[in-house]
Amino acid sequence: MVQDQEVLAAEMERTFIAIKPDGVQRGLISEIVSRFERKGFKLVGIKVVVPSKDFAQKHYHVLMERPFFNGLALVLLFAMVWEGEGVIRYGRKLIGATDPQKSEPGTIRGDLAVVVGRNIIHGSDGPETAKDEINLWFKPQELVSYTNNAEKWIYGDN
Ligand code: GDP
Ligand code: MG
């Protein structure tokens, strides 16, 4: 890994991915990180957070009217920002459908979860949400830019 503040990072898409308390408690952090890492995406921010209930509900504000809203307390979270071409959309594919019963085998929820209330992972669902969620969970200085030497083997020389 070479430190390089100039990098393409500026143009590269970023998404907010979080392993929820159930995923953390079940020891699935490395399994989940490894799926994003092996794909070729780049980890540019990471922290373990214990958000207040208010903060967790801010994250899920669009679901305020839903009956399960109060159950959405994110009491412990492994929060990450991943970077790469198409990472928002493809990250959702790696994660699978909201309800693990409907997630394809091979996806994170398909392989590792059974019910919707314990679906172990969150991923931003579009460019606007990604930007908002990254800003909500991370300060700009908590995100890094660096060149990963594998990049030319992942993306070619362009
Ligand atoms: P996601 O983007 O695939 O995570 O799905 P949503 O944004 O629609 O919902 C956010 C989270 O709310 C989901 O990941 C689930 O943890 C939870 N959730 C969604 N629908 C249900 C439901 O019908 N029942 C319960 N218990 N939780 C739900
Ligand atoms: Mg969502």
Image: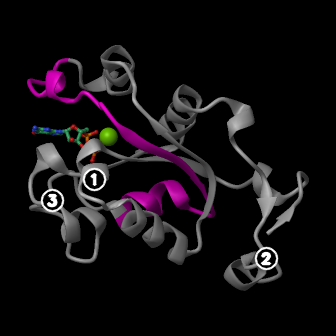
Span highlighted in magenta in the image: 65-94
Q: How far apart in space, not on screen, are marks 1 and 2 (Cα)? A: 30 Å
Quadrant observed for ligand 1 in the rendered image: top left
Count how many numbered circles sit on residues in the image. 3
Label located before the other in sequence (2 or 3): 3
> Closer to the camera, 81 or 90?
81
> Closer to the camera, 126 or 55?
55
Q: Nearer the viewer, mark 2 or mark 3?
A: 2
The disc at residue 100 is: 3
> Closer to the camera, 127 or 152?
152
Task: Give yes or no for residue 67 being in the magenta stretch.
Answer: yes
Task: State left or right for residue 85 relative to residue 20.
Answer: right
As drawn, 52 above or below 40: above
Task: Give yes or no for residue 58 being in the magenta stretch.
Answer: no
The disc at residue 149 is: 2
Q: How far apart in space, not on screen, are marks 1 and 3 (Cα)? A: 13 Å
Q: Nearer the viewer, mark 1 or mark 2?
A: 1
